[in-house]
Image (cartoon, rainbow, N blue to C red):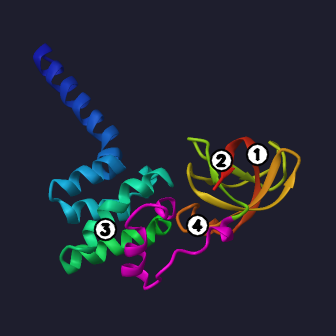
Amino acid sequence: MHKSHFVLHTAAFSILALLAFQTPLMACGTVDGWIFSYRQGEKYKALFHMLDCSDSYQAPADDIALLPIVEDALNSSSKVAELGAAVFKHYNHLWGARQKAGYREVLYAVSGIKEPERLGRYRGWVIITARSGANMRAKPSLQGRVITSLKYGMQAQMISRHGEWVKLKAVGPGSVDPRFERKQGYVHESLLAPY
């Protein structure tokens, strides 16, 4: 093969490999990217990405960032408002933003509920603090079979304690693979914080 052809083929292969590697991230983006797209006027695109790409989402911090977007969407055209309401429901009703101004108005507009549920209901709930998520195990031990993995920032309800291990129930939606939602298992206390 001629040297210039080899260089061209190598360059083309490198570009294709780079694109292939980046496509999943570029297709979904991040919460900051969604917010930027929305503010640039690409409302449909941003809201669709929010609904399709929850892997980039980290509750409850991102709840606070998304609340103003949902608020604005509800005041837009009916189709945008419909998508905004879907985002609000899809992301655990943005519970991490429940103390923020505007949350009650959004909650009422989407669900007809005038007041958020009392926080007392969430006594004993925890969030996953490990950035890489946390394995839920069948036994309170690192040797216990992994039932599923909970994402960073997602919620679970504490059932009991066994030394350094906490027995939890995943409380979704969005906290866990739907096949395992409401499953119970053990997570080490170092990976948890009170909700």
Residue that appears at 28% across and 53% down: 35
Q: How far apart, in angstroms, are the residues tagged by discs 2 and 4?
A: 15 Å
> Which residue, given by chain and number where applicable, does mark 1 sit on?
188
Q: Amino acid at mark 3?
A: Glu
In-image side of 158 versus 88 (left or right) = right
- Please name which of the two marks, 2 or 3, marks the residue nearer to the observer: 3
> Which residue, given by chain and number where applicable, does mark 3 sit on?
71
Instruction: Identify the image quadrant of residue 63.
Output: bottom left
Magenta segment: 95-122
Residue 134's label in the rendered image is: 2
- Please report contact status of discs 2 and 1: CB closer than 8 Å, yes or no: yes
Q: Amino acid at mark 4?
A: Gly
Residue 165's label in the rendered image is: none
Mark 2 or mark 3: whose residue is earlier in sequence: 3
> Which residue, given by chain and number where applicable, does mark 4 sit on?
172
When the figure is inspected, residue 5 is found, relative to residue 68, above or below; the finding is above
